[in-house]
Image (tube, helix red, strand yellow):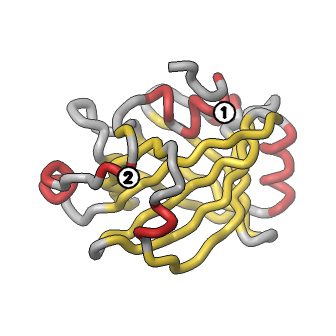
């Protein structure tokens, strides 16, 4: 089991394109099957690189600041993934994830393509950190946009269940 430490930002401009050093990108499709959800965790099924299917169990983010969570990843078969995707009741999203660097940090830039069967134009940037102190002390540049770290309504789970928040 790993611990993920990150801060998330909702960006409304394309300024990030000029600031980051591009590494790689991947198309990701994921869902949150109702049958696998339990209190205190979120379980998602993710398809990447066409034939890689993974089940992720993610513990709820830290109570005080939402900066960290536990995460476990298990590779599953295409048949199992197809079963879960077919039982997601449109709780599915797809996004283009660009992995980049900025001032020594890894950034995941998620450009959402579709959420709940509808076209989306949402960009969320996640910055990964090695320690909680590093995450807490980081001063984000303005181009990152509005911080949504710890705001559950902006989690991928909530986007799949309820769509994009109006506020």
Mark 2: few, some, or many residues within 10 Å (few <14, many ≥20)?
some
The location of residue 21, given as percent across then percent down, is: 45, 77
- Front residue of 50/57: it is 50
- Front residue of 92/113: it is 113
- Helix or strand or loop: what does disc 1 sit on? helix
The disc label shown at residue 143, or none: 2
Q: Nearer the viewer, mark 1 or mark 2?
A: 2
The location of residue 72, given as percent across then percent down, is: 48, 56
> Mark 1 to mark 2: distance in Å?
26 Å
Residue at the spot 42% in from the left edge and 64% down from the top edge: 107
Residue 109 lies left or right of residue 126; in this view the side is right
Residue wearing tag 1: 160
Residue 85 lies left or right of residue 48; in this view the side is right
The location of residue 120, given as percent across then percent down, is: 71, 40
User: Which tag, 1 or 2, sits closer to the chain's start?
Assistant: 2
- Helix or strand or loop: what does disc 2 sit on? helix
């Amino acid at each position: 089991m790993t611990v993920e430490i990150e801060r998330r930002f909702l960006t409304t401009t394309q300024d990030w394109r000029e600031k980051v050093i591009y590494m790689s990108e991947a198309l990701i499709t994921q869902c949150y099957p109702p049958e696998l959800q339990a209190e205190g965790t979120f379980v998602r099924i993710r398809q990447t690189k066409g034939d890689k299917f993974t089940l992720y169990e993610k513990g709820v983010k830290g109570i005080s600041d939402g900066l960290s969570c536990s995460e476990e990843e298990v590779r599953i078969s295409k048949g199992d993934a197809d079963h879960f995707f077919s039982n997601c009741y449109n709780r599915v999203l797809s996004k283009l994830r660009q992995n980049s660097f900025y001032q020594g940090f890894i950034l995941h830039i998620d450009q959402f393509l579709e959420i709940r069967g509808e076209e989306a134009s949402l960009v969320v940037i996640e910055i990964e950190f090695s320690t909680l102190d590093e995450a807490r002390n980081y001063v984000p540049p303005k181009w990152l946009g509005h911080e949504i770290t710890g705001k559950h309504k902006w989690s991928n789970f909530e986007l799949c269940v309820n769509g994009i928040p109006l506020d």
